[in-house]
Image (cartoon, coloured by chain):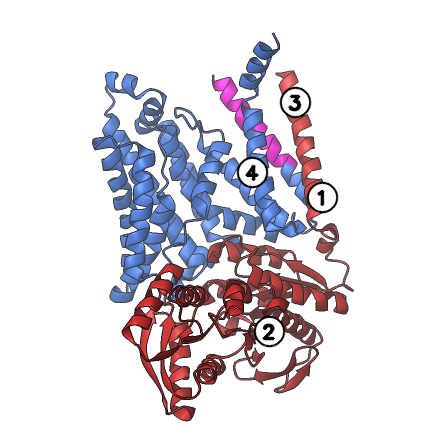
Amino acid sequence: MKAKKIVTMILVFMCTALLLTGCGSSSSNAPKADNGGKADKKVVAMVPKVIGSPYFDTCAEGAKKVAAEFGFEFLYTGPTSADAAQQVNIIQDLINKKVDVLIVAANDAQSVAPALKKAKAAGIKVMTYDADSTPDARDLFINQTTPEILGRHIMDNVAKEIGGSGEYAILTASLTASNQNVWIKWMKEQQADKYPNITLVTIAPSEEDQQKAFAQTQNLVKAYPNLKGIAALSTVAEPGAAQAIEQLNVIGKIKLVGLATPNGMRQYLKSGAAQSATLWDVGKLGYLSMYMAKQLLDGKTPTDGMEVPTVGKVAYKADNKEIIMGEPLDFTKENVDTFNF
Amino acid sequence: MIGVKRSHEWILLLFFIGLIIIMSLLAPSFLTVNNLLSVTQQMSEFGILALGVTVVIITSGIDLSVGSIAGLTTIVIAMTYGWSGSLVAAILLGILTGALCGAFNGVLIAKIGVPPILVTLGTMTFFNGIALVLSKGNAISDLPEEFYFVGQGYLFGNIPVQTVIFLVLAILTSLLLSRTPWGRRVYAVGNNSVAAVFSGVRVDKVLLYVYIFAGIMAAVSGWIISSRVSTARADLGAVYVMQSIAATVLGGTNIAGGSGTIFGTVIGVSVFAVLANGLNLIGVSPFAQNLLMGLALILVLLINNMSIIKRKFTIFIR
């Protein structure tokens, strides 16, 4: 029994050592992060929907750069799966850690709201980015763009590629996805306003599945012989559609635009199966978030049309406390290699 | 045998205390009342899940469906409230759903004799499917303010409500196991179900109630989760399934059945909660956190099985 106790002690010590080295290697300035007394260095924590996603990690890279400029301590942590409950746990821990600013991309608008309100009550500046919580739970929402801007922009892209007249089809994620439906509504508005000679033939669902998007595109091409363009509105629908266009050998005959990441579309943009993929500059979104964190800490309220370094002019909606980064970004054959997410 | 069992928990407790000391040294804000209370708040949800899982594992079974039951419960509560407007009815129906799901597992396992892992692997997907069909995959969040009391409210000033619920349920489960004839039968079934049959135990009945119990615990857990995050969603309990099984085994419950205590499970759950919270405070990346948690699990299991390892080792040396 005595020997056993000694062995236990040794193992506990070994574990201590492991923990110490573990945190030492994973973030070099970690032990300093917890000094509540050191007031000169502000701690800003960014919590994405899920950690390890290239989209959010690119965003964090952008934020990290400005954080260093401003002399902020930057913490980047989040759930390992896009899980609302796990994200709330992390937010609670960050409140106890007494960070100065919390920037969260909400997995679920309602779920994070109570925790964010608690953070506000504890004197923490609370911001959301990419995906908002309920407006009363945060001080500021950094929105990449609005559904109206995005919808109209995609329609413009369709018109540009098919040449101002002809038939096109929309490949949506699913017929019940509310964000998709709002985009489609604005696409139709833009079409009615500016492109009377273009007709929308159908809206086909791809159920967030690349294989389905592939099959749907094949069907569309066969069903509508006069089809000139497709707008694919999800990050799996556009690659799926591009694959189908390649396989049916209609490259150039059917033009493809949509919403997707540069990494997902790189090969198809280069092969010509797709003309453009639209999203926004995610790195800039992170930059803008951190810049606004500084504004909040300095006690400044944003103004509409204010100029942000490297980002440019941004819009501010005071009623909703929302910053809109602005125009979407098109990834094309020419510029796709400068982005990596 | 009893002596060995006690030493397992003793070692784990020592490990736990060591962990608390390390965390307090590395993160000054760890050892504050507020933080420790929020640790207990975070552990209650999967702790309650683990209570049910412990009882199941003592009978040498396993329940993989508890997470799906928790998720389904949240949907049932939200939808029932939606059409009835009565919170009491919604919660009662939610708990009843958990009991029914447990009974469904129990009947397949106890009466028909399908292995628990196969049954609950199937019902894990099945219950989740029901929840998805009912909610069409959407999150439901139009719940009344009173509903948030269980997950966000405080008693006696600043003690989280769910911490109290967890404590009460843990004590009740512990008493059920150690002080009632049913508890003795649970251990008997886990030790040797054939012997249990010959000593007059209705094994099927014991098992049926065990799975119903696990289902009810899962339902309570789901109720609390949805109250804390103000939302009902089919996938809410999913991340806690493996964690609750791991905490149970960490707490010294034999995965082959027959032995284990609620006290051990509570420490096991605490170890996981303290690790997650402390590592967050220190600023360790969530990926490294998973690695360290897995390592801690392996380490404690090795310590717990030291006598076996030593025996094997001496044979090997000879």
Q: Are marks 4 and 2 in contact (CB under 8 Å)?
A: no
Q: Please report, as a chain letter, where disc 3 is located.
A: A
Which quadrant holds residue A266?
Answer: bottom right
In the picture provided, is A47 more to the left or to the right than B86? right
| Mark 2, residue position | A334
Image location of residue A162, percent across then percent down = 43, 83
On residue A7, the disc is: 3
Q: Please report, as a chain letter, where disc 1 is located.
A: B
Image location of residue A276, percent across then percent down = 51, 74
On residue B96, the disc is: none
| Mark 4, residue position | B294
One can see residue A75 in this view: yes
Q: Name above or below for residue B109 compared with residue A338.
A: above
Q: Amino acid at mark 2?
A: Glu
Same chain check for tags 4 and 2: no
| Mark 1, residue position | B25
Q: Nearer the viewer, residue A163 or B301?
A: A163
Badge 2 or badge 3: first in the primary sequence: 3
One can see residue B232 in this view: no
